[in-house]
Image (tube, rainbow, N blue to C red):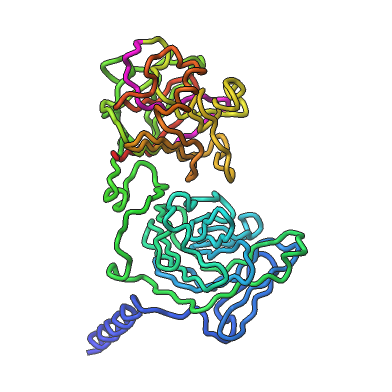
Amino acid sequence: MKKYILLGCGLLMMTASQAQQGKWQNLFNGKDLKGWKQLGGKAVYSVKNGEITGTTVIAEPNSFLATEKNYGDFIFEVEYKLDNDFNSGIQFRSQSKPEYQNGRVYGYQMEVDPSPRRWSGGVYEEGRRGWLYPLDLNPSAQNAYKANNWNKYRIECRGNEIRTWINGISAAHVIDAELPSGFIALQVHGIGKRQEDVGKNIRWRNIRIMENPPASAYSAYDSIYVVNMIPNTLSEQEKRNGYTLLWDGSSTKGWRGAYKPSFPEKGWEIKDGTLNVVPSDGGESTNGGDIVTDKEYGAFDLEFDFKLTEGANSGVKYFVTEKEGNSGSAIGLEYQVLDDEKHPDAKLGAAGNRKVGSLYDLIPAYKLYSTHKKVGEWNKGRVVVYPDNRVEHWMNGQIVVAYKRGDNIYKALVARSKYAKYEGFGLAQQGRILIQDHGNAVSFRSIKIKTL
C-alpha cells in the first residue's frame, strides 16, 4: 500500500509540474524588486505606478537588473518606454561570473536602439562577440520601434534557436549553441561622462515568462533571414527559406579544381569541419590551385564563414566560367578575403578596393560599425546577386559593397582595372563559385547557397 501511495504522490507532483509548463508567470509583482538583483553599474532602479524605472548615472558602466533565477527554454514578453532616446536592451540567457572579467555581464541582448540605424529588436552579445543579428538583415522590422511610446518585446528561446519580435513584427532569428541558459536582465546603458545624458529614464512593465513552453506555444516559422552560428548546418527555417549546403563539411563532393577534372590532390585540407588552404609560397594557385563548384549559378544568395591567419590572402569568386584559360587564379568577380593590416595587397589598387570585403580591384568595402572581426576569428561573408543584376557584399550582417553588373558605372570601373583586357568581364549569365588558393592559410566553413 505504501508503495502505491508514494507512486500516487509522485504522479500528482509530476502532474502539478507539467501544469506549470505552458503557463505565463509574472516576473515583476508591480510593487517591489523581489526576485531581481543589480549587476554591473550603479544606475538607479525604482518602482512606481506598477512600473520599473531605470535612471542613468554619470561615469558608470552598463547596469543590469537581473532575475535571480536562470531560464533556458522560454517565451518572454515585456513592454518598455524610453522617456529620452538612448541605447538599452533586454539581456537573456546571460551570465555574470567572477572568473570572467571580474563578473562582467555577458550574454544575448535584444537591442533597444532608437538611433538612425534602427536596430531595435536585433540580437547583440553583450561582453563577448558583439552583433549577431544587426537589423540590416531584416529591413522590414526597422520601422517597428515606436518613439516616445510603449513598445512590446517578445523573445522565444527553444534549444539553439533564438527569435525576437518588436510590436508583433518578427525581428531576428539566430541559431547558436553558446549559451543554453542564463538570467534575464533590464539594461540601463552607461553614458560615460556626458552630463547631458544624466537622469534619462527607461521604464518597463508587464514583464512575464512562460517556461518550457509546449511546441504549440512557439510562433510558426516565417521567412526572415536566419543567422546560423552552428557550423555546416541548416536550421528548419533556413531549409524552408530555400538554402542548401554548398559544402557538406566533410568531403570534396560538389567541388573540383579550377581548370581540372577533379579535386586537387594537394594544397587543401579538410579538418574538424573546416575547408583549409594549405600554406605554401603565397602565390596564386601555385600549390593546390583554386577550387570551383561543379554547378553554375546565376542569381543567388551565397553565405560563407572565413577565418584568416596573419598576413593571409584569399578570395571567394563568382561568375567564374574558366573560358579565359589563364595561368594563376581563375577569372571572376571577387569578394576579397585579406588581412588588411599585414598583407601588402591592401595598399595596392585604388581607394582601398583590395581590402577585405571589397569587390576586388573595383569597389572598396564600406567600414560600418566594426564589421570586420580580428585575424583568427570567424567572419560571416555573403554575396547576393539579384535577378536584375544588383549585387551586394555583406560582412557580419552589414552591406559593405553594392553595385549593378553591366551598368555604366560598372563598365567604367572595369575599364580602369586589371580586368579591362577580359571582354565581358563579370557579365556571364551563370558561372561557378570559386575559393582561391593564394598560398596562405585561410579556413572556410558553413558555405551555403540559395537560388533566387
Q: Of residues 128 and 409, which is closer to you in this image?
A: 409
* Relative side of 47 to 237, left or right: right
Instruction: Residue 315: say if magenta.
Output: yes
Residue 376 spot, x, y in % from top left: 54, 35
Viewport quadrant of the N terminus: bottom left
Q: Quadrant of residue 170?
A: bottom left
Q: Of residues 21 and 374, which is closer to you in this image?
A: 374
Q: Can residue 218 be seen in this view?
A: yes
Q: Quadrant of residue 350?
A: top right
Magenta stretch bounds: 305-325
Q: Can residue 264 be seen in this view?
A: no
Residue 3 spot, x, y in % from top left: 24, 85
Residue 444 spot, x, y in % from top left: 42, 33
Q: In this view, does 181 lie above or below 413?
A: below
Q: Residue at x 43, y 24 (%)?
A: 277
* Relative side of 143 to 65, left or right: left
Q: Residue at x 31, y 35 (%)?
A: 299
Q: Count of labels shown? A: 0
Instruction: Residue 388: say if magenta.
Output: no
Q: Which residue is drawn at 56% across and 37% down?
A: 366
Q: Is residue 448 above or below residue 326?
A: below
Viewport quadrant of the C terminus: top left
Residue 196 spot, x, y in % from top left: 75, 64
Q: Is residue 180 above or below residue 84?
A: above
Q: Residue at x 31, y 71 (%)?
A: 217
* Relative side of 322 to 283, left or right: left
